Amino acid sequence: DAGLNENKIAEFQIARAEAQKARAQISLLEEKISAAAMKAPISGTVISPDITRRIGAHVEIGETLFEIAPVKSLRAELSVPEDEIADVLMAFERARAEGGEVTGELATESKPGDHVGFVVRRINPVAEVEKDQNVFKVRARLDGVRPGMLPGTEGVAKINIENRSHASIWTRKLVNWVRMKLWI
């Protein structure tokens, strides 16, 4: 304005160009800030790495910073030992033939007294080695999620197969071991 009043048009045009440049830089920075905002397509809990360790570090476009798990729809992945999978398979096939479901309960290590019901959905037909033991992965849908349950939580599960006497349950492993050794 001072340049216009004193007929210094060149200084006025330089000042106006610098103001436009500053506004363009502000606009660019605001756009970069809005592009840097992270929004997940689902609501859930952050389950992998601690992002605070990466503060100030260089990040590539498209790089995974962390994973989010939907806590409202957690599922269980049970590791059933090889010597027990036949019972689970028979119960699963019987339930499918009758139009029913195989159910069970699990207790997490963090809250062992709080049992959560589940329904078996799928049995992986191929064994995996886990802690030097062959196990079959059984996927189950949880009936509900309790406060404090997070992805990756471990615990113990009991699958409802059939009613058996306590004696047959307690001696089953011994009987199977004898059968294998004596080839009966």
Image (tube, rainbow, N blue to C red):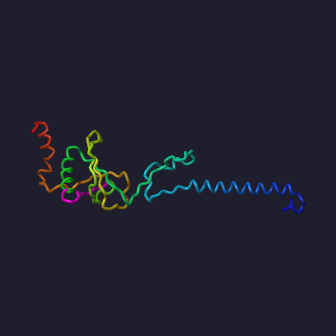
Q: Which residues are magenta?
A: 97-108
**Which residue occupies the foreground of this view, 120 or 170?**
120
Give the image location of residue 124, x and y in percent: 28, 47
Q: Quadrant of residue 113?
A: bottom left
Give the image location of residue 88, x and y in percent: 21, 51
Give the image location of residue 12, x and y in percent: 83, 58
Does 43 sit left or right of 37 as displayed?
left
Does 56 sit left or right of 91 as displayed?
right
**Which residue occupies the foreground of this view, 17 or 159?**
17
Location of residue 181 with respect to 52 vertically, above or below? above
**Which residue occupies the foreground of this view, 34 or 179?**
34
Query: Is 134 part of what is drawn in magenta?
Result: no
Q: Where does the N terminus fall, quadrant-wise?
A: bottom right
Q: Residue at x 13, y 36 (%)?
A: 181
Q: Where does the C terminus fall, quadrant-wise?
A: top left
Instruction: Count numbered badges in the picture.
Output: 0
Q: Residue at x 26, y 45 (%)?
A: 125
Does 30 sit left or right of 15 as displayed?
left
Location of residue 59 with respect to 3 vertically, above or below? above
Q: Residue at x 30, y 52 (%)?
A: 139
Location of residue 4 with respect to 174 vertically, above or below? below
Give the image location of residue 126, x and y in percent: 27, 43
Residue farthest right in this picture: 6
Q: Residue at x 51, y 46 (%)?
A: 63
Query: Is 103 part of what is drawn in magenta?
Result: yes
